[in-house]
Image (tube, helix red, strand yellow):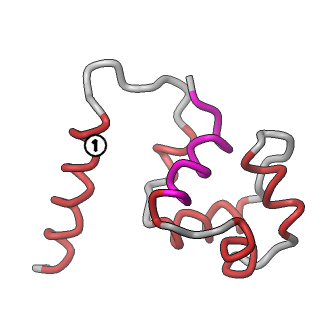
Amino acid sequence: MKGLGEKIKKEREEWGYTQQEMSSLIPMNQSNYSKIERDLQEPNIEQLKRICEILKVDPNYLLETDDFKEISHKDIELLKEVKILIRKFK
């Protein structure tokens, strides 16, 4: 099971952001952001909201405690693409 920080790190890397870029966008200290990714510190609600906005990820995904066993990573990526398409045509 992935922790909150590990999920944030995975999403950040997929978007191609560095930790420094993320911390600037939130905004927060880069050292504290690094602690979040290492699960040494939890983000406050405003920081979590900004992280979700920047990474375009549902907070429920980051906060869920059980990983999906039936859905593959490719399925999740496809669902993200479909979600983006739906938003474009609203």
Q: Quadrant of the N terminus?
A: top right
At 80% from the left and 55% from the top, the residue drawn is 34
Task: Identify the secondary structure beneath mark 1.
Answer: helix
Q: Is residue 35 above or below residue 52?
A: above
Q: Which residues are magenta?
A: 2-13
Residue 68 part of the magenta segment: no
Camera-side residue of 51 and 17: 17
Q: Is residue 78 above or below residue 29?
A: above
Camera-side residue of 18 and 78: 18
Q: Quadrant of residue 71?
A: top left
Q: Position of residue 51 (x, y in %)?
A: 61, 65
At 48% from the left and 45% from the top, the residue drawn is 60
Q: Residues within 10 Å of mark 1 (few under 14, many from 20)?
A: few
Q: Position of residue 33 (x, y in %)?
A: 79, 60
Q: Is residue 67 above or below residue 84?
A: above
At 56% from the left and 43% from the top, the residue drawn is 7
